[in-house]
Image: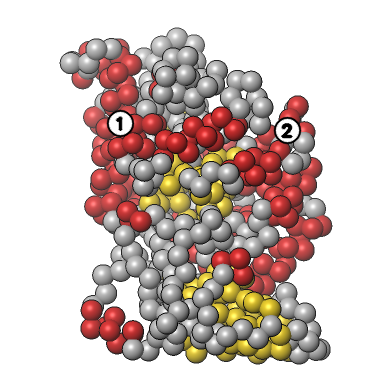
Amino acid sequence: MRKGLRGAAASVIALSALTACGGRADSVEPPGGADPRAAAARAAKIECPGVPAPGDSRSHQVRGMWIATVQNTDWPSRAGEPVERQKAEYRRLLDTAKALNLNTVFFQVRPAGDAFYRSPYEPWSQWLTGTQGKDPGYDVLQFLIKETHARDMEFQAWFNPYRASLDPDRSKLAAGHPARLHPGWAPRYGSNLWYDPGLPQVQDLAAKVVLDVVKRYDIDGVHFDDYFYPYPDSGQFPDRATFKAYGKGFSSVAAWRRHNVDTLVQSLSGRIHQAKPWMKFGISPFGVWRNASTDPNGSRTQALQSYDDIYADTRLWVRKGWLDYVTPQLYWPIGDPRADYRTLTDWWSRQVTGTGVQLSIGQAAYQVGQDSAWRNPAEISRQLTVNARYPAVRGDVYFSAVDLVRNRLGFATRLRRDHYQRPAIIPVIPKLGGAAPAPAAGVEAAGGGTSVKVRWKGSDATSYAVYRVDGKGAACAPVDPRSLLVTVRGTGISDPTVKPGATYTYYVTAMDRLHHQSRPARGATVVAQRG
């Protein structure tokens, strides 16, 4: 990692060092819905009743990274590492994310019919211990969520709904693996075992796996990537018998396959929100739905088509509102003749407009330094500049974590310098409900030596946003999103970025878990003392 990024990491980590003595950092209760009498009592204690709560702005962004576990892509770096080394590696990934001012983790909890948690349906992942089904000796998912939330980042649990195994030899699967117990559920296709999406038993298994995690763990969302029916390999996917049994009434195998995937997406959307109405459900599809040469509603591209090749009608899911967010993988550079990044950003922006579905862009961090346009360390920074022209684009997610850590050609340092100099609050998704909690109160700031300590009295919030302005600010004033210093879970920070002798004013807003903000508390002004 380059020196500039290490320096940024030190400051951000210090800003995130909290006294967690207030707020419900890991509450699993639904946001909003408080007793009206309690709300009235809190309103009487509002310090700045004439100041509005901050609304949405372009400064509010999803900034995420995928952490892939399949084949130890990102974490853990090797199967069978000691537990404490595994934990230290995960903390380093998160610290890199915070140094870059990211705010969301998409963690692969089910890479291939296995689990990074104790599951009643599937074995422990081989990429944890080296042996599928072997207990790693700790609650892995609970640890991951706790560490992520401690840094006030969202944890999106990433599932692969249909991949059963990367090895076609069933004898290597753990004894209780569903693909070993029920060979007919997961035929071989190419070099993998792949659950047959047309089987009701497979759809039921996928739903049970997801809902088990939704109900037992304090995740912030459920996330699928682009794997539905497998990408084309040699020959046809072996589901002719399934089509014969369940495909009556469909004009073609292709239409039936799309229906199978649609059914899973629609059903899970409803069941996830029934279990926890505030929970996010999103998908990161292949970046091209259909080419315009095939369908006039498609994009002006010449690429594989998710609708036709993997039977994923991603445009339908957006238009039907089955998703809360969509993160298409736009892994082509600007000007690519097959699929120009600008063309696809424009197309996806138009698809989400008016749907209530939030759009973020999947970015190809793994491509940096590989060939042609990707040898330019500014390519992804240029793509974020394109995004800024489209109000519908609310953020970016990077594949994958180790590429951000490696910072090839300094591209991650450049991203922070060009686009991520300040942290960002995740945009609210209105259809998920929620409401701003009671404001914080009693903000105090004191400084000596090289840092200023800021403390406040907490409320029923999940987290807090701390804003800093230069000089003596008004006691009660609206906050500018461009002055956001940090978001935290707890009731205090230490700010090491001050200059001795300078005057600063700090303001604090309270947030629910969906990032609705309260009115700011009365500001606190301090002169950073010289050491």
Q: Amino acid at mark 1?
A: Asp
Q: Residues within 10 Å of mark 1 (few under 14, many from 20)?
A: some
Q: Is residue 314 visible?
A: yes
Farthest residue to the left: give it. Answer: 249
Q: Which residue in the protein does label 1 denote?
A: 262
For numbered disc 1, what is the local secondary structure? helix
Closer-to-camera residue (214/69): 214
With 28 as the anchor, is 157 left or right in this view?
Answer: right
Q: Amino acid at mark 2?
A: Trp
Image-quadrant location for residue 459: bottom left
Q: Residues within 10 Å of mark 2 (few under 14, many from 20)?
A: some
Q: Residue at x 56, y 70 (%)?
A: 480
Look at the picture and state if 318 lies above or below 215: above
Q: Which residue in the protein does label 2 denote?
A: 374
Q: Residue at x 57, y 85 (%)?
A: 474
With 34 as the anchor, is 237 left or right in this view?
Answer: right
